[in-house]
Image (tube, grey):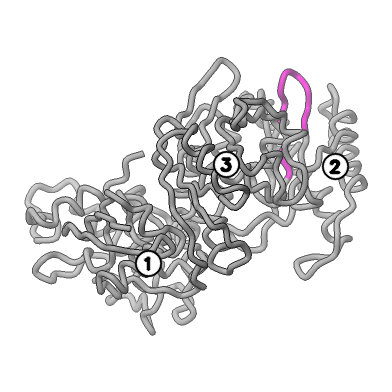
């Protein structure tokens, strides 16, 4: 079946079997291997991506169901010129990763949380990120990182002189950024 | 962890969905949020030949407020229920389901149709005596919650029928208490207490094949509000259940937890009632 999707602001047409999961389509058909697959049955959270601004486990959605949707993956998080997103920087700063396998899912879940809540407490961060499993860090560095990114984003959210290219998207990235905003 | 091949049909209306299910002669399956179905397919515990996707049928995600009830479409997502403020019981129960990425896709209708006795919505539906509307080739029929859950993973739905609406009363007061080992897990014990039309209703999930109603506890509580009545009602719930043993918990522990969480849920309902919050 043909599926039209926009991934990180770029339109794509792929031809997939109905049983192809969105995660496999992103990895195999579009070569976006940043989305990781751990358990492949919706437990580990490694494959979390944004679909029309909502966090989704890409192993629990079939690619054919994403027809017409706008998808943001980990590859769409940094700016077009490669400037890391504050979340990415915070994960480096605070040792929020070790082997890195869970990191793409962690970042996408954290992104969703920071879209919804400006200053989540450490408790809230743990609660909201509990669907993402990490076997290396012991989570403390991850909570630190999300907290740091939240502070940074909050500092900038009401300033006009945004210094950084990731907050001033180019045309190509605009769709992806718009799609990131939850519409509930 | 890859599903077996299947045909995919994107239904455009309830009628076309039912037609597709009928054409599949019992080998078709509806996919809504897919949060329970996709793992089942991935592990090949089930291999339907046709998946009928209802996500694009217009209007099925509607939420309509009446004076003392809510009419909910089957495609209302868990996240929608967490965020609405018409029924705070539904908002609280929704919070206990999985994680954000599960709640954004998973649906009320899917959970109720899946009829997992450990899932939150069947217990809530049982306590609220929700009314289900089921559509099939012969038209629509209404099914009371007490008759809808026939067994574990066994709803009162024919292979060519579909749940198209859920009517949930808004309780005067309520309590929700769940025991799970990790955040987002299915409940080992879930107890919902609700006061609807001045009558107590207590439902217990996680024990037995379908949500159980603690009728004796409901009767003990009656018009009483004293601590002794609450204790007696909780004890009656613990004594009424016959839980099984498994890797997660022994039957003695489960029965003790039914008593404890029934107690908590009633106390929550009474204190919310006293504070005028519901």
The answer to whether any part of residue B278 appears in the image is: no
The residue positioned 77% from the left and 47% from the top of the image is B151
What residue is pinned by disc 2?
A: B234
Tell me if residue B197 is in the magenta stretch: yes
Tell me if residue B32 is in the magenta stretch: no
Which one is in front in this view, the residue at disc 3 or the one at disc 2? 3
Q: Are marks 1 and 3 in contact (CB under 8 Å)?
A: no
Q: Position of residue B2 (x, y in %)?
A: 49, 71
Say which chain tag 1 marks.
Answer: A
Q: Horizontal placement of B202 versus B70: left or right?
A: right
The residue positioned 34% from the left and 70% from the top of the image is A35
Q: Horizontal placement of B107 versus B216: left or right?
A: left
What residue is pinned by disc 3?
A: B22
Q: Is residue B150 above or below residue B69?
A: below
The residue positioned 52% from the left and 27% from the top of the image is B86
Q: Position of residue A130 (x, y in %)?
A: 50, 63
* Highlighted magenta segment, given as a residue range: B191-201
Who is closer to the viewer here, B131 or B215? B131
User: What whole-number distance in Å separates the C-alpha atoms at marks 1 and 2?
Assistant: 46 Å
The residue positioned 82% from the left and 57% from the top of the image is B254
Q: Main secondary structure of the magenta part?
A: strand
Whichever of labels 3 and 2 marks the residue nearer the N terminus, that label is 3
What residue is pinned by disc 1?
A: A23
Q: How many marks?
A: 3
Which one is in front in this view, the residue at disc 1 or the one at disc 2? 1
Secondary structure under badge 2? helix
Q: Position of residue A88 (x, y in %)?
A: 26, 70
């Amino acid at each position: 079946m043909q599926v039209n999707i926009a991934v990180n602001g770029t339109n794509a047409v792929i031809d997939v079997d109905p049983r192809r999961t969105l995660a496999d389509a992103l990895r195999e058909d579009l070569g976006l291997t940043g989305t990781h697959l751990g358990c492949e049955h919706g437990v580990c959270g490694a494959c979390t991506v944004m679909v029309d601004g909502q966090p989704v486990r890409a192993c629990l959605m079939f690619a054919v169901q994403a027809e017409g949707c706008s998808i943001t993956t980990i590859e769409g998080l940094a700016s077009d010129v490669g400037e890391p997103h504050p979340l990415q920087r915070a994960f480096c700063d605070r040792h929020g990763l070790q082997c890195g396998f869970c990191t793409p899912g962690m970042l996408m879940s954290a992104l969703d949380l920071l879209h919804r809540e400006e200053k989540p407490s450490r408790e809230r961060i743990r609660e909201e990120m509990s669907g993402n499993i990490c076997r290396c860090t012991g989570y403390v560095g991850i909570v630190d990182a999300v907290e740091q990114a939240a502070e940074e984003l909050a500092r900038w959210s009401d300033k006009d002189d945004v210094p950084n290219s990731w907050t001033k998207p180019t045309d190509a990235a605009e769709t992806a950024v718009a799609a990131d905003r939850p519409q509930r | 962890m890859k599903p077996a091949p299947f045909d995919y049909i994107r239904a455009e209306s309830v009628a076309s969905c039912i037609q597709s299910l009928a054409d599949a002669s019992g080998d078709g399956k509806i996919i809504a949020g897919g949060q329970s179905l996709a793992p089942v397919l991935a592990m090949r515990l089930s291999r339907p030949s046709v998946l009928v996707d209802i996500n694009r049928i217009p209007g099925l995600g509607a939420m309509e407020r009446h004076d003392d009830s809510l009419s909910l479409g089957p495609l209302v997502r868990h996240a929608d229920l967490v965020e609405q403020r018409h029924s705070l019981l539904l908002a609280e129960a929704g919070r206990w389901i999985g994680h954000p990425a599960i709640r954004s896709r998973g649906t009320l209708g899917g959970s109720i149709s899946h009829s997992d006795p450990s899932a939150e919505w069947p217990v809530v539906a049982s306590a609220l005596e929700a009314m289900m509307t089921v559509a099939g080739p012969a038209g629509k029929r209404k099914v009371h919650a007490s008759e809808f859950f026939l067994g574990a993973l066994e709803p009162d739905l024919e292979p060519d029928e579909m749940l198209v609406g859920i009517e949930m009363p808004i309780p005067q007061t309520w309590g929700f208490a769940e025991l799970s080992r990790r955040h987002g897990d299915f409940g080992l014990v879930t107890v919902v207490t609700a006061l609807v039309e001045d009558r107590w209703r207590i439902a217990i999930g996680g024990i037995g094949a379908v949500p159980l109603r603690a009728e004796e506890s409901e009767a003990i509580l009656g018009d009483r509000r004293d601590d002794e009545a609450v204790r007696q009602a909780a004890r009656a719930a613990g004594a009424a259940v016959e839980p099984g043993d498994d890797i997660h918990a022994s039957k003695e522990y489960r029965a003790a937890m039914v008593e404890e969480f029934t107690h908590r849920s009633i106390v929550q309902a009474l204190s919310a009632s006293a504070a005028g919050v519901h």
